[in-house]
Image (spheres, rainbow, N blue to C red):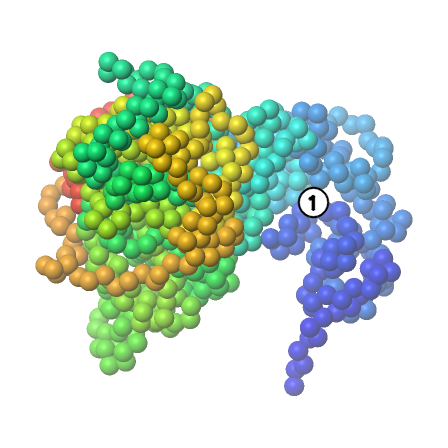
Amino acid sequence: MATSPPATVTLTIDGQTVTVPTGTTVYQAARAAGIEIPIFCYHDRMPPLGACRMCLVKVEKMPKLQTSCTLPAAEGMVVDTRSAEVRAGQEAILEFLLINHPLDCPVCDKGGECPLQDQTLRWGPGRSRFVEAKRDFAKPVALGPVLVLDRERCILCWRCVRFGELIAGDHALKGFARGYASEINTPSAAPVESKFIGNTIAICPVGALTSRTYRFRARPWDNHPVASTCTHCGLGCAVWLDVRGGQVVRTRARELPAINDVWLCDLGFFGHDYVGAPDRLRTPLVRRHGRLEEATWDEALELVSARLAEAHARAPGRVAFLGGRRLANEDVVLATALFREVVGTPHLDHRTDVPAGSPSLEVAWGLRAPIDEIARGDVFVLVGCDLTEEYPVLWLRLKQAVDRGARLILLHARRPEIARWAHWTIVRPYDRLAQAVMDLRAAVSATRDSRVAARVGAAPRDAAAAALADAGGAVAAGGRVHVFVGRVALDGLSGRPILRAVADLAARVGGVVHVLRGRGNDIGAQRLGLVPAAGGWTAPEILERAGAGEVDVLYVAGADPATDAADAAVWRAARAGARFVVVHDPFLSPTAETADVVLPALVLPERDGTVMNLEGRVLGLRAAVAGPGQARADGEIFAQLAERLGAVLAPAVADELLARMRRLVPGFALDAVVPVDPVPVLPPLPAGEATGAGLDGEGVLVLPVDTLFTRGTMTGRCPGIAGLAGSPRCVVHPDDAARLGLVDGALVEVATAAGAVVLQVRISDETPSGQVLVPRRAEGAPVGRLLRWPQIAARGTVRAVLPAAAAGGGA
Ligand code: SF4
Ligand code: SF4
């Protein structure tokens, strides 16, 4: 009978006895014992490689020096990491690396935080016997909008290549040629295609890969790191904000195993430059004679409080508040205290981008389990979500589970980038998505019900039906099943049947349904009560009522409905119908441009506070830099307005603020995960449920989708993100492109009954034929222009405006 190996092995390293689990490498065992071995290619989130040969050790009874990172520790092994022979080996490796290295440390971004510098100081020979000319390449090589390569600095450790192979799965970089001539590039020498490339800059042990936006901006010892949280997508990755001269010059990942481990996406890495943008608002603006003009805080607050008091006197319900995504939790509590308790209106909401009638308004957003628990799942079903475009680092966590054998099932109206990892990808045009979800539910039931299973099994199946049946079988097989419902699935008329189907499907297998909805601090706004009180209006209702002339003061803070409203005509009517509009914003956003008073707000990296991420975890913010001019924190503005209205906001006092948060959200504490109720099974609509979403008719189906990189009010002011976003492009299927005579890069007009936008075209079969995808937040072309509530898609036309060459695009 075979005996299983012992659980641990005991070895001796530099005379020290070390016991480690079986399978541990000698390098890891030494590290566990506090013995440092120099190394370049090893990264503890990837398997060992043994490429750099720096981690040499001498092992008793072994003839040659060994690479400790690839050598399993064995019982009784005697290892020496310090002997003269080992030192000579290490010195030789370093000397060889330095022959080829340009030693341009004074102008290298990595200088001061460079493992090659550090290890040369500690383990190097102290002098070099080589006087040959250095390698000299044309430099730097631009590998895309954010990544730059200085080839002569590369020590061929393969960390960057392996990150793309093993962690991100996007194979963004590749090694070419062999030996002395080896170099790194993208697979086709085209700009790098990745949403995670900033991580390769972070893990490159030398300055071979650097950031285009940070290059030559600072020496690391001049940077002051501030621990904070990325607030772009709502996942809440932990970051270091590196500050120099009052500016955030760089963002780096901060290790937080519960959320992002040690990684960030490129929106997190390169999405901070808006903080120091030159066109930040510095003073309040007041509309005089039709123009927004600078005003004092006193003047602006007096005007706003007078208008609030007048509206209150007329009827408190004639004031409505919209916003929350950009607000910290503390601001949210002060906003609700001001508008509910002092002004007395029940009309508050943060869901400014949801169409009227959407089931997204009926369920709490967010994950129903901590990310760590989800990452231990066995089956993931993603319905109408595209993780790399919406919550990229959540994909890295799920991918780890998929790599170890979890099943991945995608149902969407487009083929997501992660489809290559999926066991089943079911793509249907948007108007047939709900039916596909119902079919999956039926397949799950069928597999669990043997009588029906026999019937289904006997029926002839086409490939699509077979995929659904097999995917249903995988779900029915059980284990820990997590079903994610995204915005495309939830927001429109199909949302209700989809939500009912997934809730039922999950209930059958004991699975959990998660609602992937919300950006920035939407979850904090929702949990802390920035939703309508009894009798209050939802955000879409506020806009509709404003359009009907029922709102005297429309107050917007931390939101941009002019860009985000799912029906642009509704926003236009709301603006026209509201008598007085107040906006807090760091910039003159499209909403702020139309306001009567604009108050300059701090952004989250300029203030202390907390936010809540998608899993309901309370995360800290630290003020990294001071705000520009007279900009103030949103919460401070709410408290000052209350004072002018003759009230003191109780939560304006710090102790009361925390106490109130704990009353609103029991268990509220830094790092705590605040649980939320399971997704309910919504009742069907009285008239029954339409699964076709009422989109029959002629023309292509126009569907807005999320894209990670956009040129929004804040991201458009980050050169890296603006570069990554490029020109907004709609996606047309090759068959449709051929029929319409479109070539890649051509400028096209996408038109519906509601309106039209002009975009460049990208031809790809990631969308089904007959459907065109438009980016939801295209610069200057909000897709709300194409839509009429309650639909989130529309029938329309696509027609060429300019051929590719004239549009400046191309394949
Ligand atoms: S570019 Fe950097 S990470 Fe990539 S192989 Fe070269 S040294 Fe290693
Ligand atoms: S996944 Fe979201 S929170 Fe994390 S770095 Fe990217 S944008 Fe920021």
Q: Is residue 168 visible?
A: no
Residue 265, percent across and down? 48, 42
In which quadrant is the C terminus drawn?
Answer: top left
Q: Is residue 378 above or below residue 298?
A: below
Q: Is residue 131 visible?
A: yes
Asked if residue 274 lies left or right of residue 130, the reply is: left
Q: In front: 757, or 235?
A: 235
- Secondary structure under tag 1 reads loop
Residue projecting furthest to the top: 289
Badge 1 amino acid: Phe
Asked if residue 615 lies left or right of residue 411, the reply is: right
What residue is at 26 percent from the left and 27 percent from the top?
Answer: 307
Q: Which residue is mark 1?
A: 40
What residue is at 40 percent from the left and 34 percent from the top?
Answer: 639
Q: Is residue 263 above or below residue 681?
A: above
Which quarter of the picture shows residue 803? top left
In which quadrant is the N terminus drawn?
Answer: bottom right
Label 1 CA crowd tier, 10 Å (few <14, some 14–19, many 20+): many
Which quarter of the picture shows residue 103? top right
Residue projecting furthest to the front: 646
What residue is at 77 percent from the left and 50 percent from the top?
Answer: 37
Q: Note whether ligand 1 is within 8 Å of mark 1.
A: yes
Q: In front: 183, or 589?
A: 589
Q: How many marks?
A: 1
Asked if residue 389 lies left or right of residue 567, the reply is: right
Residue projecting furthest to the bottom: 1
Residue 162, percent across and down? 57, 48
Q: In front: 596, or 737?
A: 596
